[in-house]
Amino acid sequence: MSGENNGFLRKVFRGLDILLIAMIVAVFVEVLLEVFFRYVLHRPLSWGGELSQTILVWITFTGAAVALFRGEHMTIDLLVQRLSSDRVKRGLRLFTLLVLGAFLVLGVDAGWTVVVRTWRMRTTAMQIPAGILYLAFPAGCLLMLPVVVRDILGTIGR
């Protein structure tokens, strides 16, 4: 990918960093409110757990995309370390990236199907579309796709 596109990706993922920080702060504040209302006022919040659950799911899939962008996902490279040929290593890397890309495309498609099917359902406490919770998965997959394309192009270009 060109440097200009890479700069664009960096800006997008910097924005996602800020969004992740905001979501973590929101969960922290919600938990503090939940404790205060439950144990001080003896009036638990009916929507607290549901809100935290939804935000945590979004943190998981958005955070997975950010980790992929930074190359921070855990890898098991025992086999790769034993290979002596750089060409074979690159081929194996390209293969794994193509498999990951295919999985992400399927994840976007199948995830979107689930979102559409659940959008009219309402959550119990907050009464928001249940599809909002499920939207985190295809959104995370969609965020990961340009990173995989960048990595594929970088692997081919070496």
Image (cartoon, helix red, strand yellow):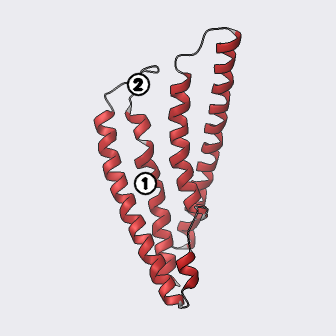
In three-dimensional space, the C-alpha distance between marks 1 and 2, rounded to whole angstroms, equals 24 Å
Compared to 96, does 16 lie above or below? above
Instruction: Give percent across and percent down for residue 68.
Output: 55, 61
Q: Secondary structure at mark 1?
A: helix
Q: Residues within 10 Å of mark 1 (few under 14, many from 20)?
A: some
* Residue 64 at x, y percent in the picture: 54, 53
Q: Which mark is residue 142?
A: 1
Q: Is residue 39 left or right of residue 56?
A: right
Q: Is residue 52 above or below residue 79?
A: above
Q: Residue at x 61, y 62 (%)?
A: 70
Foreground mark, 1 or 2? 2
Dot 2 amino acid type: Thr
Q: Which mark is residue 111?
A: none
In percent of the image, x 57 and y 16: which residue is there?
Answer: 45
Mark earlier in primary sequence (1, 2): 2
Please report contact status of discs 1 and 2: CB closer than 8 Å, yes or no: no
In this rendering, the answer to whether 104 lies above or below 156 is above
The label number, if any, that marks residue 123 in the structure image:
2
Q: Residue furthest bottom?
A: 85
| Residue drawn 39% across the image and 31% down it | 130
Task: Answer above or below: position of 55 versus 155.
Answer: above
Residue at the image position 45 percent from the left and 83 percent from the top: 91
Q: Give the structural element (helix, strand or loop) at label 2.
A: loop
Report the number of numbered marks.
2
Q: Please tell me which residue lies in front, 42 or 140.
A: 42
Q: Amino acid at mark 1?
A: Leu
